[in-house]
Image (tube, rainbow, N blue to C red):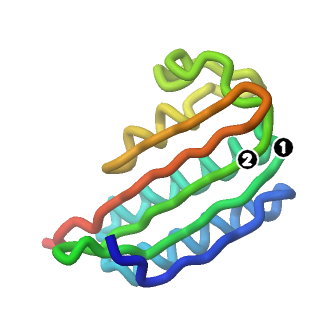
Amino acid sequence: MTVLVSERLTIAVEGDVPVVRRRARELAQAAHFDAFASAAITTAASELSRNALVHGGGGYAVVEHVSDGLREGLRLVFVDEGPGILDIDRALRGGYSTGRSLGLGLSGSRRLVDEFHVETSLGKGTRVEVVKWARFRR
């Protein structure tokens, strides 16, 4: 996979969440995403950056415009050094939250993207990587 653009964005305060969301939307447009794919990756960016802030105590996002030679897409990586996710299987099923939310951040984001990978370690933090490929416009 070739990285065309890569930016690291800090997630430390509530105001950082819309910055990550906005940059994901800008790169989705640069990668020629249609409206649905652009909304999907933008929503995932918002949910995952909020998770890093609220549950992980902050961290960072790496937002990348990528190509595999045949198509363009976005790869987003979210990293925090928080407590980790106690029950990852339950968190990925949805409806489970350690905060005051619907518990749909991880599970919902997974449904919105083409590739999803999460690594978590208790007491050390969580890393979530997602990829969304541009779909052909019709």
- Please give the name of the residue rendered at 55% of the width and 68% of the height, measured from the top-left corner: 63
Could you tell whether 93 is left or right of 132 in the image?
A: right
Residue 105, given in percent of the width and then of the height, sits at 58, 37
Please identify, in this view, whether the residue under mark 2 or under mark 1 is nearer the observer: 2
Question: Which residue appears farthest toward the left when viewing the image?
Answer: 138
Q: From the image, tell me which residue sits under label 1.
A: 57
Could you tell whether 32 is left or right of 24 in the image?
A: left
Residue 2, given in percent of the width and then of the height, sits at 35, 77
- Sequence-wise first label, 2 or 1: 1
Tell me: residue 24, above or below residue 111: below
Would you call the spot at circle 1 few (<14 residues within 10 Å), some (14-19), or many (20 or more)? some
User: How far is mark 2 from mark 1, CA to CA?
Assistant: 7 Å
Secondary structure state at the residue bearing disc 2: strand
Tell me: residue 13, above or below residue 26: above
The residue lying toward the viewer, choosing from 12 and 44, is 12
Q: From the image, tell me which residue sits under label 2.
A: 80
Q: Using the rendered view, name the quadrant where residue 12 is placed.
A: bottom right
Tell me: residue 77, above or below residue 108: below
Which quarter shows the C terminus?
A: bottom left
- Please give the name of the residue rendered at 25% of the width and 71% of the height, measured from the top-left corner: 68
The reply to whether the C-beta atoms of the residues labelled 2 and 1 are less than 8 Å apart is yes
